[in-house]
Amino acid sequence: MIQAVLDTNVIVSALLQPLGPSARILVLALSGAFQFCVSGAIYDEYEEVLRRPRLKLKEPIIVETLAAIRRQGRWIKTPPHVSVCPDPDDDIFIACAAVAKADYIVTGNIKDFPSRWEATIVVTPRQFLEIEFPEAG
């Protein structure tokens, strides 16, 4: 089964643009169409960002989304620190992907990541859908 780590911007985009590629990816992830890998650090970032007032997300949507991620995610215990990305905050996604041996990191900001890390390829949401789920793209 395909394994992917979703950058926080994919989750945010999914909730802000429910008809966009990120939303399709989140629906696929939460329905079990692929294995959605998440670590404690990634989950914490999801929660912190989703609760930012400027996003104006409704509390029930935040709670529902986080509960679904907790239930459906494949939880990965990651090493305390990996230093790969120009922005150290993005290293949590690399660490999770490396330990999970994930096929993909899906992000709206591919410039913030190496194009590949070990066996993991970094792709945009649209690229992920085109490659793995062309019928959903």
Image (tube, rainbow, N blue to C red):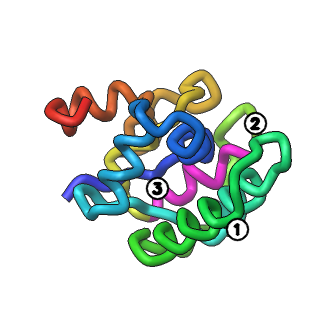
Observer-nearest of 78 and 106: 106
Assess whether mark 2 and mark 1 are in contact (beta carbons under 8 angstroms).
no
Tell me if mark 1 has few (under 14), some (14-19) or many (20+) residues whose alpha carbon lies within 10 angstroms of its own: few
Residue under label 2, please give it.
87
**C-alpha span from label 2 to label 3:** 17 Å
**C-alpha span from label 1 to label 3:** 13 Å
Magenta-tinted stretch: 88-99
Residue 48 in view: yes
Residue under label 1, please give it.
80
Does 112 appear in magenta? Answer: no
Eyeballing the image, is 26 above or below 77?
Answer: above
Q: Residue furthest left?
A: 135
Q: Position of residue 55 (x, y in %)?
A: 75, 42
Residue type, numbered disc 2: Asp
Q: Main secondary structure of the magenta part?
A: helix
First in residue order: circle 1 vs circle 3: 1
Quadrant in the picture for the C terminus: top left
Answer with the quarter of the image where residue 56 lies. Answer: top right
Left or right: 1, with 129 as reference point: left
**C-alpha span from label 1 to label 2:** 16 Å
Residue under label 3, please give it.
98
Q: Residue furthest right?
A: 53
Q: Position of residue 3 (x, y in %)?
A: 32, 55
Q: Position of residue 27 (x, y in %)?
A: 35, 52
